[in-house]
Amino acid sequence: MSHKDSLFYEVYEVFSKKTDTSSLQHQFSLLAPNQELAFVMAKENFFRREQVADIWVVKRDHIKRMSQEEKEAMKHLEKNYRETKGYGYLKKKWRQYEQEQLTEKDIMGGGEG
Amino acid sequence: MVISLNERMDHFMNRINSGEKIEADDWMPDDYREALIRLISMHGISEIMGALPEKEWVPKAPSIYRKLAIMAKVQDEMGHGQLLLRVAEDLMEPLGRNRDDIMKDLFSGKLKFHNVFHMKAPTWGDAGVIAWLVDGAAIISQTMMLGTSYGPYGRALKRICAEEVFHAQHGESIIMALAEGTKEQRTLLQDSINRWWSSLLMFFGPRTNAETGHSNQDQNMRYKLRTKTNEQLRQEFLTKYVPRVWALGLTIPDSTLKFDEETSEWQYQQPDWEEFKSIVTGHGPKSKERLALRMRSYEMNSWVREALGTSEVSNVAR
């Protein structure tokens, strides 16, 4: 491989939104010599058919990704105290007082739903 | 903390067996990496070489609708090639190899591509048979690998399979038009099926090592890169398509072909596995011509890579 080739081949990651209200989603990666061509290729490679509201291309080197060790360290964290499932026992408790526990929807109530 | 190779290997196999997906930067044993590079670069290059027999039919398609559809399919195949080569490149990076090496391996004959793409496509019937049955065969082997242990390959296949459905229906549509057409059209279609039958059986690879002296099936199953054997896939293909070919009043050029109720398996005439070996090592009817075409376009486009690549060098130098 020559030095010239290595400059042409830079990895870009492609993200997109299907509609204005949907979240940004990772699509795939591609090789391109610069941001402009990365964008052109992203359209050609991934959006020949699909509806798309927005496309982002980011040079992979500019992204901090997690290593295998970092991912595995995250996995074992117990966070029940932060989640509703850590408070499931309340349902039974309220029954003892002849009351139903307020559901997530009841607590959030008052909105449009 | 020092972790021994055995511990790493045990951890890796535990991840695979519990259904976790391996990512490009994760630790993986060398033979897993090599198996993936072999499988995915072959798959990626086959998509690109597979566009060539069909591209021959773009200028000759019988209507504007067919021309648009086959052009879209050719474009999809090149897109699939791009996706898969990206997956292979990320695996090759730690070995200091890149896309240029993949192309050079293709040109030198080190990297092989699917047997079907070494064959001639002389009539519009072939365009139909390729899209219906060759893509049909490819869908069977690709959907089997959707659950592969290697995450990036699984994600690429998910995108690819979604588009393959259009390809198969484009093929069905061509087949249906010819099958319901004139006597000449039916003969044209029957000739194409006759021409492609043994290639279609070969597509899935030999049943065991015995036929060709070599197979990576066992290793790929152990690493959960695949979940079914070549023969299981071939049987699925026969179950799916033989009744449909027959229903259209067409025949298959194998008088021994029948479904054995007792074994629940199709019996068929084995294709010539010596011929298969000869085809995939670059001695098929169109091998040299199509490789020359790919090589020529790679050389003709090299100025683009150089122009865009070196501009950055000159910017830095300034």
Image (cartoon, helix red, strand yellow):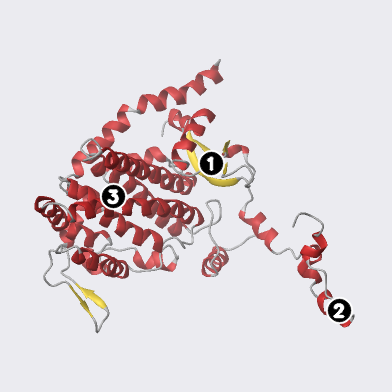
Q: CA distance from mark 2 to mark 1?
A: 49 Å
The mark found on residue A93 in the picture is 2
From the image, tell me which residue sits under label 1: A52
User: Residue B288 at what x, y percent from top left?
Assistant: 19, 41
The chain that hosts pointer 3 is B
Residue visible at 43% across and 31% down?
Answer: A5
User: Residue B153 at what x, y percent from top left?
Assistant: 46, 54
Secondary element at image label 2: helix
Examine the rendered structure and indicate whether residue A93 appears above or below residue B212: below
User: Residue B125 at what x, y percent from top left?
Assistant: 18, 50
From the image, tell me which residue sits under label 3: B112
Instruction: Indicate the quadrant where residue B292 lies.
Output: top left
Instruction: Indicate the quadrant where residue A83 lies.
Output: bottom right
Furthest residue in direction front, as rendered: A112
- Whether discs 1 and 3 lie on one chain: the answer is no
Q: Residues within 10 Å of mark 3 (few under 14, many from 20)?
A: many
The image quadrant where one finds the C terminus of chain B is top right
Front residue of this view, candidates B5 and B177: B177
The chain that hosts pointer 1 is A
Residue visible at 30% across and 54% down?
Answer: B135
Disc 1 marks a residue whose amino acid type is: Val
- Whether discs 2 and 1 lie on one chain: the answer is yes
The image quadrant where one finds the N terminus of chain B is bottom right
- Cβ atoms under marks 3 and 2 closer than 8 Å: no
Examine the rendered structure and indicate whether residue B47 appears above or below residue B312: below
Residue visible at 65% across and 60% down?
Answer: A72
Instruction: Decide if residue B110 is on the left or right side of residue B1.
Output: left
The chain that hosts pointer 2 is A
